[in-house]
Image (cartoon, rainbow, N blue to C red):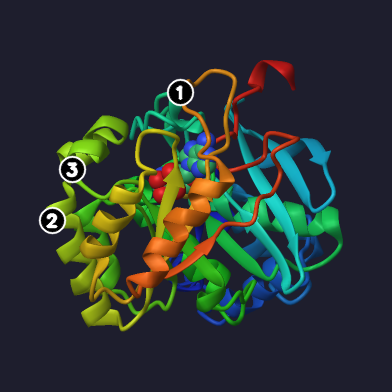
Amino acid sequence: MTSIYNLTREDLENYFLSINSKKFHADQLFDWLYVKRVKSFDDVTNIKKEVLEEIKKNYILNNIKIVNVEKDKDVNKYLFELSDGEHIEAVLMFHDYGTSICISSQVGCNMGCKFCESGRRKKVRNLEVSEMVLQILLIEEELGSRISHVVVMGIGEPFDNYDNLIKFFRIINDPKGISIGARHITVSTCGIIPKIEEFSNLDLQVNLAISLHAPNNEIRNKIMPINKVYPIDKLIPCIHEYFNKTNRRVTIEYIMLEGINDSNLCALELSKLLKGLNCYVNLIPYNETENIGFKRTKMIQIASFYDILKKNGINVTIRREFGGKITAACGQLRSREEQI
Ligand code: SAH
């Protein structure tokens, strides 16, 4: 049986029509699910019993559960068990402007980035829409408060699960549902060009981040196999095109890997590559993990790299770090599965 949280409000309207019921029940049920947050279809009071019985024949509510929570000063990490026994993680960060949740989009990942712990396990499957929605609902329930921002930067390549991802956005952005503003939602991709193009035609104001991590094909090929399919010389024009269509500034993520992509020359090359692109660069201090040999660039070199970008007119920030102690930081998720 599938979860009711897989359905957008439009899907629900069609469902109610298909069972010869009333379309407006979709709005009512959405309210029960996402505003009142019922735990059982039996708690729904304004839809006829026969109709609810019909729904129960086809749908269940939750299909994931929280099985572990680790808490640090300003970050919580949640381990979820899925109905087939697989596990995924989500990370909640407490900022001065609110809370943001970093959710997973797949079990495993096929992109094979050399530096990323989360991708060491091959993709097992895509997450269902409901499995993404419920990461938010269950954490909000555990917290007892609302989450203000969502980033799809956990385990998986979201654009490799594109259709479910977009439905997920429609549900959480729906003003009659969880109602998280599109500008408070960000999706990060390693650069799947056809999906970036599709995404640019969408009527959603969701933010886009690109994991670039290198200023040229030679370096990027070595650390991100996807670059052989969608190389930098095609990716950058695609991001220009995205901006032209959407007028939305893109975030360029750049991990600082010692001796690999962090020289002053790389900074110059990156400045040239991004010249004229309306973007801002987020320099990410690399989170070292036990199993992977890459080293984090020293802070002094990160500062030098930052200065070079700045001097060349590139908007740049250095990412604040969260969750290193409880292996909840970028690229560390699921690196200690056996210990949990
Ligand atoms: N697959 C998508 C979504 C994952 S986002 C993507 O590639 O964008 C996770 C971000 O953390 C990506 O930018 C990824 O490259 C980065 N990352 C991976 N391993 C990391 C590590 N060990 N330290 C810091 N950042 C890392």
Q: Is mark 1 within 8 Å of ligand 1?
A: no
> What secondary structure is found at the residue carrying circle 3?
helix
**Residue placed under numbered mark 3 in the picture:** 217
| Label located before the other in sequence (2 or 3) | 3
Quadrant assignment for the C terminus: top right
CB of mark 2 within 8 Å of CB of mark 3? no
Check disc 1 and give the amino acid type. Answer: Arg
Tag 1–tag 2 contact (CB < 8 Å)? no
Question: Which residue is at 64% across, 52% downward?
Answer: 134
Report the amino acid beneath label 2. Answer: Lys
- Residue 193 vertical position relative to residue 67 in the rendered view, above or below: below
Of the two numbered discs 1 and 3 in the rendering, the one whose residue sits closer to the viewer = 3
Residue at 64 percent of width and 71 percent of height: 178
Mark drawn on residue 121: 1
Q: Is residue 204 above or below residue 234?
A: below
Helix, strand or loop status at disc 2: helix
Q: x and y percent of residue 257 in the render?
A: 44, 37
Image point (35%, 41%), residue name: 261
Identify residue for label 2.
234
- Alpha-carbon span between mark 1 and mark 3: 25 Å
**Are the residues tagged 1 and 3 within 8 Å (C-beta)?**
no
Instruction: Classify residue 278 as left or right of residue 148.
Output: left
Q: Nearer the viewer, mark 1 or mark 2?
A: 2
- Secondary structure under tag 1 reads loop
Using a 10 Å C-alpha cutoff, classify the residue at mark 2 as few (fewer than 14 neighbours), some (14 to 19) or many (20 or more): few
Q: Quadrant of residue 221?
A: top left
Q: Amino acid at mark 3?
A: Asn
Q: Which residue is located at x 81 percent, y 63 percent? A: 43
